[in-house]
Image (spheres, grey):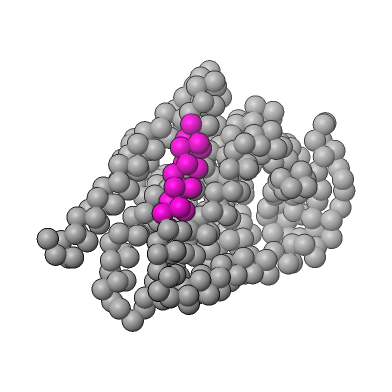
Amino acid sequence: MDTLDSIVIVSLFMWGSYFAFLLAISIRYRDYLTSQNQKLRKIDGILITFISIAVVLIIYQVFVSILKGLAKQCSVIVAVFLIILAFIFLRSHILNLKYRRAKVEGPYRLNDVTYYIRDIDTCEAWYDPRKREITITRGLINILNSGEIRFVIYHEEGHHRNIIHTMFAVLSIFIWALVLSIFLSLIAINMPTIDFILTEVAILLPILGIASLGVTLINWISEHEADLYASSKTSPFLAASTLLKIYLNPKTKIHIDFLISDPELKVRLNILFIMKILFINSMFKIPKSLTEIPEKPLIITHPPLTLRLYAILKNSRK
Ligand SMILES: [Zn+2]
């Protein structure tokens, strides 16, 4: 058997693994979304998160061993890897500067929840697990009514309450950035040899796809859990109106065209549909996302609006 044959076989095996994982995780995710039993839903959510984080860690190990194997012959690879990694982290650091410079007001209280307002006109809210702090931007407060602001604060409180999901979401993005930077390093140092690049695309791309799929699901489950907590603290109606306002506001940079042209709005919730959006997300959107965080965080780490609404409304009908 020559090299080409073995590359084709390994490649088929890798793509087969990718689609097998896509099918398995889509079925679990559909069960999670359609579950009306709170306990079963929670267990499904934790199961998906644990399986995904294990898969992402294994793939990280695979990529590290490939990198080590090549590093013996070529120490340049380590330098390229470090440069790409530095670029990834520096870029988000620089983009975050304007957020850090904006004036902070507070602390304010909503029942037993403490939050801060950041005087910046973008529409965002976040929970910082290190400082255990909830922040909401002035821009978001300006487009929401008082009930909807409560939903947002409880959503962020939901990230605090579901700390396992939040920590794994942060961890998974960090590991995934490492995985992606190793992938890019391998391509960068092998630029002159087209054969090697083809091999990488055939074999390493589906492996990267599996990691991206895991990261997507870990983050989406974390968001659903926060949504469902906030919905139970406010109301499904407030949840739906808040999400619609946030998604449709031009300042969130998700243009209305994106939603309307989105096939997700027209299709019912079957496995093929879930597999399709997870495929698009893991193969195209997640790899593209390094250039989009933090400008468009909702597109990358958050489930599509339809699925968020679906989970909220499904859960409210008991
Ligand atoms: Zn969130």
Residue 168 as seen in the image, left or right of residue 209: right
Residue drawn at 56 percent across, 74 percent down:
83
Segment tinted magenta in the rendering: 47-63
Image quarter (top left, top right, bottom left or bottom right) of the N terminus: bottom left
Residue drawn at 34 percent across, 55 percent down:
206
Most foreground residue, 69 or 107: 69
Residue drawn at 41 percent across, 54 percent down:
62
Q: Provide the major secondary structure of the magenta segment.
A: helix
- Residue 66 is one of the magenta-drawn residues: no
- Residue 48 is one of the magenta-drawn residues: yes
Residue 74 as seen in the image, left or right of residue 243: left
Residue 237 visible in image: no
Relative vertical location of residue 28 with respect to residue 97 in this rendering, above or below: above
Rendered image quadrant of residue 207: bottom left
Residue at the front extreme of this rendering? 72
Q: How many labels does the image show?
A: 0
Relative vertical location of residue 260 with respect to residue 46 in this rendering, above or below: below
Measured from the top left, where is residue 230 in percent x and y? 66, 33
Measured from the top left, where is residue 101 in percent x and y? 80, 65
Residue at the bottom extreme of this rendering? 192
Measured from the top left, where is residue 145 in percent x and y? 73, 42
Most foreground residue, 36 or 78: 78
Residue drawn at 19 percent across, 59 percent down:
6
Residue 246 visible in image: yes
Rendered image quadrant of residue 114: top right
Most foreground residue, 245 or 295: 295
Residue 228 as seen in the image, left or right of residue 144: left
Residue 92 as seen in the image, left or right of residue 54: right
